[in-house]
Image (cartoon, rainbow, N blue to C red):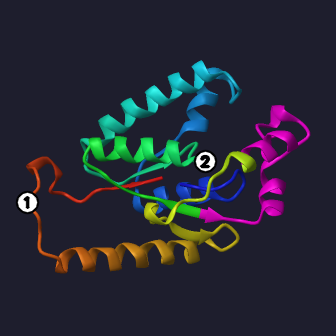
Amino acid sequence: MVGIPGAGKSFFAEHFGETFRAPVINLGKIQTELFGGINDDHREEELAEKVVQMTFTELSKTGATIVYDGPTESRTKRQEIVQFARSIHYEPLLVWVQTDSGEAARRSTSTRKSDGFLTDDQFEQAVRRFSIPAPEERAIVISGKHTYASQLKIVLKYLASNRNTTVTQTPKPRPAAATTRRRFIQ
């Protein structure tokens, strides 16, 4: 899942997970559970990311679709996630949830940080750090203001057209462990 805070990434991830019985790994929830919240301690974030990698590695044994909802604001971070997904024989799919910054700020900010929301300054910093997906990342774009049903139609249409294209191409030999096409949605 890709987008600025408050865009609707978690909303889509959770609904998609429920619809398709796919595990959703939310780094923010893991950090909150382990450390009582999300803060600027990079050691805590690194530990939570290790838990995520271990969880992904175990879930990859099932061959099921896995949805990742975590920090994907930079191309570098997304490339790391893509490389990791491919190392466990998954083909990543980026879903970019777009929402105007005013609406996203309203959804994600609060004057009380204890509510689990960002402060206005934290939101602005996150927006400045966000880099839009490059064309070669081939992200699917959905609107954070549309209903889940509308968002899902876009993603499913992409998956169906991608599958048809893949089936008509001449198959290339692959290692036995990578013959099943699995999705890793971030």
Residue 36 percent across, percent down from the top left? 68, 24
Q: In the rendered image, is residue 84 in sight? A: yes
User: With 164 as the anchor, is 105 left or right in this view?
Assistant: right
Residue, disc 2: 73
The residue beneath circle 1 is 173
Number of numbered tags placed on the structure image: 2
Q: Residue at x 58, y 42 (%)?
A: 71
Q: Identify the amino acid type marked 2.
A: Glu
Q: How crowded is mark 1: few (under 14 residues within 10 Å), some or many (20 or more)?
A: few
Other-residue count near label 2 (Cα within 10 Å), few / some / many at <14 / 14–19 / ≥20: many
In this view of the protein, which residue sits in the foreground, 69 or 3?
3
Q: In this view, does 81 lie above or below 168?
A: above
Please state the horizontal and vertical placement of residue 139, each as a whole percent of the image: 49, 64
Q: Is mark 2 on a helix, strand or loop?
A: loop
For image coordinates 91% across by 40% down, the residue present is 111
Q: What segment is highlighted magenta in the picture?
A: 97-126
Image x and y of residue 141, in percent: 55, 70
Q: In which quarter of the image is residue 118?
A: top right
Q: Is residue 161 within the magenta segment?
A: no
* Relative to 58, 129 lies left or right: right
Task: Give percent across and percent down for residue 18.
Answer: 48, 57
Q: Can the viewer see residue 119 in this picture? A: no
Q: Horizontal placement of 57 versus 21: left or right?
A: left
Q: Say which residue appears at 34% left-offset and 80% top-offset.
A: 161
Mark found first going from the N terminus, 1 or 2: 2
Residue 168 vertical position relative to residue 38 in the rendered view, above or below = below
Mainly helix, strand or loop, the magenta region? helix
Q: Is residue 98 located in the magenta-colored stretch of the structure?
A: yes
Residue at x-position 40% and y-position 56%? 21
Q: In this view, does 142 lie above or below 33?
A: below
